[in-house]
Amino acid sequence: MEVNIGMFPLFFLVQESLINVIYCDNIRVCPGDVLDIQCPKGDVIVMSASQFGRMMFTECTVVQDFIGCHNNVLFLLEQWCSGHQSCQISVPNKELKNANTECLPYLSMYLEVDYSCLKVLTASHLDCQKPVILTDNEGIISSHETANAGCGSSRSPWIISESGCPDLSPPAHAWYKRDGDQAVIGCEWSQKTWHLSCDGRGWSGVVGNCSDIVTQQPVDVKNEIGDSP
């Protein structure tokens, strides 16, 4: 599948594969500390949850009074961190304090976040004219990285479009091979194959069933009574 943005192709896409995802949940940052997120090279931060307040009695809350108040500040953390490889946030800061509507302002409040580090596909701004070949049906686009790419401008809005076909899932007992817009599916236990072509919107062709071929394979059966024929 090729993904293009107007005249320029999309060059930054997060691959949502469980193998390439690092999950970090319930990261707690006490007052006076700094939230410091560092994703590996080639990964970006995707924030999934963030609260600022006194959610429960922890090492961050010296006094046990007024526990349970909190503010959803995910919108702030997304602005500061999502799409970046790293980010550092002082707790508290002016924006976090201004976002507080649930807790008494003189109380000591801490920050709690959930985030993921996701593997990304990147390309140089010199590759703006080349489409990116994708194999997954889903992904996440980073507006921060695409804005810094050098592709497109305020006079040339980015319109996301796609053409091509995602990878196929072969049926049971079959193999799959792809070469661009052409694909071949064949049975593991026979010479039967099917050829498919991508017309830009979907795969064109017919795929049969290999299960009936497997059941017809010769099987060596030992004589349980004796060795006589």
Image (cartoon, helix red, strand yellow):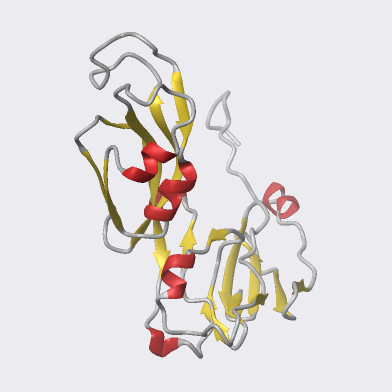
Q: Is 93 situated above or below 57? A: below
User: For this rendering, which residue is in front, 39 or 95?
Assistant: 95
- The number of numbered badges drawn on the structure is 0
User: Image point 24% across, 31% down: which residue?
Assistant: 31
From the viewer's perspective, is 61 left or right of 97? left
User: For this rendering, which residue is in front, 195 or 162?
Assistant: 162
User: For this rendering, which residue is in front, 87 or 199?
Assistant: 87
Q: Is 92 situated above or below 81? A: above
Extreme residue toward the left, this view: 32
User: For this rendering, which residue is in front, 55 or 195?
Assistant: 55
The C terminus: image quadrant: top right
On the image, the x and y values in percent for residue 86 come to: 28, 56
User: Image point 35% across, 60% down: which residue?
Assistant: 84
User: Image point 39% across, 59% down: which residue?
Assistant: 119
Q: Is 87 situated above or below 114? A: below
The N terminus: image quadrant: bottom right
